[in-house]
Image (cartoon, helix red, strand yellow):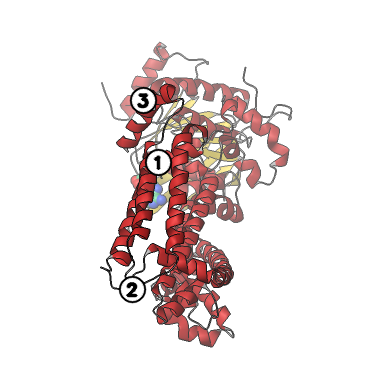
Amino acid sequence: MSVAVEQRDDSAALAPVLGGAVWRHGLIAAAAWIVAALVTVALPDVVPWGSRDLFAGSLLAGAAVLAVLAFLIGRVGRLSSWLVRYGPWFIALGVWFALWELITAKFGWLPKPFFSPPHGLLHVYVVDWQRLLICIAYTARLWSIGFAGGIVLGFVGGVALGWSKSFAYWGMPILKLIGPVPASAWIPATFFLFPTTFQASIFLVALASGIPVAILTASGINTVNRAYYDVARTLGADNRFLVLRVAIPAALPNVFVGLFMGLYYSFAVLVVAEMLGAKYGLGWYLQFQTAYSAYANVYAALVVMALICSGLVKLLFLVRDRLLGWQKGVVQW
Amino acid sequence: MVTPVAGTAPQPAAGFAVDFRGVSHRYDLDGRPLPVLQQIDLTVQPGEFLALLGPSGCGKSTLLRLAAGLEKPVAGEAQADGAAISGPDPSRVLVFQDPTLFPWRSVRDNVAVGPQARGILAASQKRIDDALRLVKLDAFASAFPHQLSGGMAQRAALARALVNDPRLLLLDEPLGRLDSLTRLTMQEELLSLWRQARYTVILVTHDVEEALLLSQRIVVLTERPARVKAEVVVDLPYPRRRDDPRIVARRQEILETLGFSS
Ligand SMILES: Nc1ncnc2c1ncn2[C@@H]1O[C@H](COP(=O)(O)OP(=O)(O)O)[C@@H](O)[C@H]1O
Ligand SMILES: [Mg+2]
């Protein structure tokens, strides 16, 4: 951190001399990426993984982009602050690629079928991209139906549990009982309950995302300051107003915690859900490739899943910041 | 100068006459009954400004909650204009010690809660703006509660109550948390608002001087369970000065009733 600050200071000082600031981390990162490219092509692989030259070429291209950006840092507008912030990460990435190449492909220190060098992963995308795309589409369908259904039902159920004493009396013990049951334990029951395996898979995803939403919504509504209800009631609010305009907005921060948990759980459960006779899907792909010991494919699919999941997390953060802007200053994020 | 909330409306309804008839109340404290009010008989005239004083924890807030209809007495009856108070109603609003603004609503939307809850939001836009102007918060209409100072938040809570044209305003130590300068200004504002609209006010305070400066009559309650211990009529014209010898004399009298002799 202090490095980045110092760096911005002295590049500002140099600016009049050079006719523009230089992003020093960018230059170091470019160098690191070039080193990684050299390691990739200069040393022989213990076994061939394919796409080696493509990977080295991509690293060089990346290094070129970083180097150009390093000199244009003053002219890329808002991108520049993002680049400066993540400068050390670009360096680390280059170093990591070089090390990763060395310990897997070059020296073979890590046991061979289980670990793949980065160009092994790249090779999977090159060779298998069509099937991966189909898998993404299948998973997207399963996940979006399951997640949407799960959070809607979880939210409605959570509001009922948090609001109504009799709902809570019967519902809370059941929820606490089924909450910790692992998804795979549901498989026999789901086969019995649902006519198609797709519906069974949706059920598992919905369950994984709905339960945390229900529990956190209920506890959020339970902990709403009673004084809010008193105020609203003296101002003429009926029960409907109390639920929709007092309890729910007050509990919304908790609901979002539940949504974040539900998002993670729903991704974790995809592998299990797609065990149930799915023909495509990222979870299915993971199992299928594991069974064939094609670990490079497994990692490639994991990377895709991780990227999609973190993209969705980011999206959820945006929604939360929009809806809960009033919390700024009340709570420190 | 300030204008009443009901700018163009006909004269606001006169204040409620409030009657506590043999009112007793108790709470359940860990399974044991905690008697809080005992046989309270008290009549408040329409348009009167009454102050309630008493030791902390004696049941003052409870009395206001009964008048607001948030609580039902275990014995006796609280009445407004002769009719039993059976539930909350926007014509009798309670302003709490904590402003208790809804943090997810802007100042304006907080003030709009009453009209919105009663389904007359669209017709009340002007009244809401008037109420904001009345408490001098029109410039902060779109601010959120966490952006307000303590005094501003309490004024917003007041506007939220006044926008409903209450006939009974119940104030539960509304200035208790404010610094002394803000407090003085707010006291003047409360007074001038009451003198324009003609609602009945019951003010709970722990500040004898505040009671003397604002109210027409002071009721002193005993320790819990509260009974009426003494009544002091403050028949002095407004505005009052705290160094007025008549105020000083009554202050002494009340402090003695409360058990402080000096
Ligand atoms: N909901 C409640 N449940 C149990 N006890 C309560 C409740 N509300 C108030 N009390 C108790 O009743 C007594 C009177 O409370 P309150 O009317 O708030 O006193 P005051 O406003 O005069 O300080 C206090 O001892 C308080 O602890
Ligand atoms: Mg109190």
Numbered circle sitting on residue B161: none
Name the one closer to the observer, A196 or A226.
A196
Q: Considering only order in the chain, which callout, 2 or 1, is on the residue closer to the N terminus?
A: 1
The amino acid marked with disc number 1 is: Gly
The amino acid marked with disc number 3 is: Ile
- Mark 2, chain letter? A
Residue A310: percent from left, percent from top? 46, 57
| Residue shown at 52% from the left, 83% from the top | A277
The answer to whether marks 2 and 3 mark residues whose Cβ atoms lie closer than 8 Å is no
Whereabouts is ligand 2, in terms of quadrant? top left
Disc 2 and disc 3: Cα gap in Å? 86 Å
Above or below — where is A44 with respect to B219?
Answer: below
Work out whether residue B145 can be spotted.
Answer: yes
Question: What residue is disc 1 on?
Answer: A26
From the viewer's perspective, tell me whether residue A172 is left or right of residue B258. right
Above or below — where is A157 with respect to B139?
Answer: below
Mark 1 vs mark 3: give the one in front: 1
Residue A294: percent from left, percent from top? 41, 76
From the viewer's perspective, tell me whether residue A298 is left or right of residue B3. left
Residue B201: percent from left, percent from top? 54, 32
Question: What residue is disc 3 on?
Answer: B254
The amino acid marked with disc number 2 is: Phe
From the viewer's perspective, tell me whether residue A322 is left or right of residue A272. right
Q: Quadrant of residue B137?
A: top right
Question: What residue is disc 2 on?
Answer: A114
| Residue shown at 69% from the left, 35% from the top | B125
Name the one closer to the observer, B21 or B167.
B167
